[in-house]
Every structure is written in C-alpha cells, then in structure tokens.
Image (cartoon, rainbow, N blue to C red):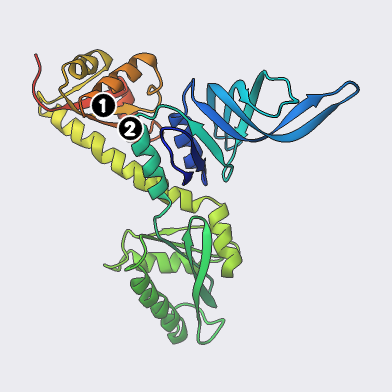
Amino acid sequence: MKIIVKDLKKETKIKPETIDDLWNLSLLITAGDMVGTKTVRTIETSDKKEKRPMYLKISVETVEFDDVTESLRLKGKILEGPDDISFGYHSFRITPNDIISITKQWKRYEIERLEKSVKAVKIKILVMVLDERKADFGEVMNSKVNMLGTIKAENQGKMFGTPEGKSYYKDIIKSLEEYIKRYDKIIIAGPGFTKENIKKITEKNTNLKGKCITGVSSVTGETGVYEVIKRGFIDQIMKTSEISRETKEIEKFMEALGKESDLVTYGIGEVAKAAKAGAVEKILVSDSIVKKEDVQEILKSVESSSGKVEVIGSTHEAGDKLIGLGGIICFLRYRIG
C-alpha cells in the first residue's frame, strides 16, 4: 500500500499495490465514505452510446472484495463528475495500482491498519533463481527488482556430489548467509531439482533455517525473479508474517481463558458490557463481523476510552478460533462484575 496524499481530515489518496492491500481497503471503506477514482462510464447521446474515461466521486453504499477477479467493487451515488453526465449510481472496480481518494471520518484502528499496510510492503525479500549451472540473486521491494549478482558453477553440467557441484553449492550457501543479514526472507526458486537440494541444506544451517521458502520459476535470471513475483510468493510471505502475529494474539487470549483469568472475556454481550465500563485494554474482532452496526458501536466505545482495536483475519486457523468465540474477544484493564 502506498499513501500518495495523507490528509485524514479532508482527502487521502491511496495506491493499493497487492491483493492484500485491496482486502485491507475493503475493511477500511464503509457505507457513507466518499471515494473517487478514474473510471469509465457509458454516456448516452441522441443516437448512440459511448464509453468515456473520466474521474468520478461516489458516496459508497456497498463494498465487495472479489478474490476471484482480484478486485474491490464499490457502488454508490455519484457526487462529483463532469458537468455533461447524468448523475446517478456508478460502480468502481478497483485493482492493484489504481489510485483512489478517500474522504471519511477515520477511526483510530482504521488509521493503524492503513499504516500497517504501508509498512508491510517494506519487508526486504531476496529471490534466488537457480539451476545446476548458475544462481541469480534479485532484491524485491514494492514488487520492483534490483538484480544483485550471479554465481556460476565452475564446471557446468556436473551433478551435485562431485567436487565442482559441492563447490557451487558451498558458494551459494555462503552468499545466502551474507544476504540473510540484510533481508527478512529468501525465496529459492528455479527449474529442476537444484532448488530443492539447496533448500534442504538451508534447513540444516543455523543461520538460514526457517528463513527460506521454496518458490516456482521455470527460468533463471531477471525473468525468473519476475515470474516468482507474478506467482504471488511475495504476497504469501507478507500474509504469513501477519498470520503469525495474529495467531500469537489469539493464543495469548486462549491461554488466559484456560487459566480462568478474570481479565479476559468474549462474545458481543460481554465485550459490550466491558467496553461500556471503559475496562477494555485491547479488543480483537474478526474481519467477518467488524462492519456490523453493534460491533462498530463497541469499537467506538473502546477507542473513546483509549483501548486498542485489532481486526483479525478469518481465513486462518486462529481466525476460526476467534469466530468460535463469537468473533470478538478482549483483554481487560481490571475485573468487572
């Protein structure tokens, strides 16, 4: 996610760069928000219809994230547009790298989620695409590639297990050990079995264990790095990182609940009671119910008493546990009756 203009009191311009960014926007944009973007609208003249590109701003009524078409659909009444069009209703289909403007009353947890989305794309990722003859290294940030270097086998065509093969593998591992000091994750991809052999070695290496994942690429070189990006492995790393953090939050709650702690509670009724008393230190709510009116009232109450709000994804195991608890749980500052 990239923020082009940040003015939370007036108009904020945002550029979603990934599918996850679109998903986050689907949670941030609610009915009544004003959203503007470039679009195409069919204009009827006296003798024909024509599709014309233009900039429109709508008052959002419905928000729908479509993971099949990988887009965000927003529908609402037109507020601003060219003078020669008939105002009415219009639908936006937002895809990665479209620029949209949002005007709304931002809640604190929404601002935090927006800022988290911006930081997420700053994860430093190294992609290594290799075969039995060479290994190419590329840095990926914001889906842009900067090729860093190449390691070539001293004697091309030799199989792993020969002195030449061992030297090639050792050179690769040595380079990965240096790179991991500067990068958060390494994706190992390429045609053939070389990537699997290297991945096995990294799992036995203290410096690299758990920091490398296997990707898919049919070629090496810069083209291979871009193929890794197109196949979604960069998004996978970001999503995995966020799921890990959310899982820890749910596990912390479950541990306290298992000990019958008086400083946790769950379910809309009990959480609403705690929020009204100003006792909520942190509230975790499932993205599947966050836009419900009664939930929004609870979140508003929690933020007014300086409590922290976190929206948890529903597409992983920890998210399922949260849904099983009514989709909303909280940690308390003090016991309530």
Query: With 71 as the anchor, is 128 left or right in this view?
Result: left
Q: What element carries label 2?
A: helix
| Residue 203 % position (x, y) | 33, 63
| Tag 1 residue | 303
Contact between marks 1 and 2 (CB within 8 A): the answer is yes
Q: The C terminus appears in which quarter of the rendering?
A: top left
| Residue type at the position of mark 2 | Tyr
At 17% from the left and 21% from the top, the residue drawn is 278
Is 63 or 313 nearer to us in this picture?
A: 63
| Tag 2 residue | 109
Q: Quadrant of residue 175?
A: bottom left
10 Å crowding of disc 1: few (<14), some (14-19), many (20+): many
At 51% from the left and 38% from the top, the residue drawn is 22
Query: With 116 as the anchor, is 301 left or right in this view?
Result: left
Q: Is mark 1 on a helix, strand or loop?
A: helix
Q: How many numbered callouts?
A: 2
| Residue type at the position of mark 1 | Glu
10 Å crowding of disc 2: few (<14), some (14-19), many (20+): some
In the depicted structure, whether residue 115 falls above or below residue 296: below
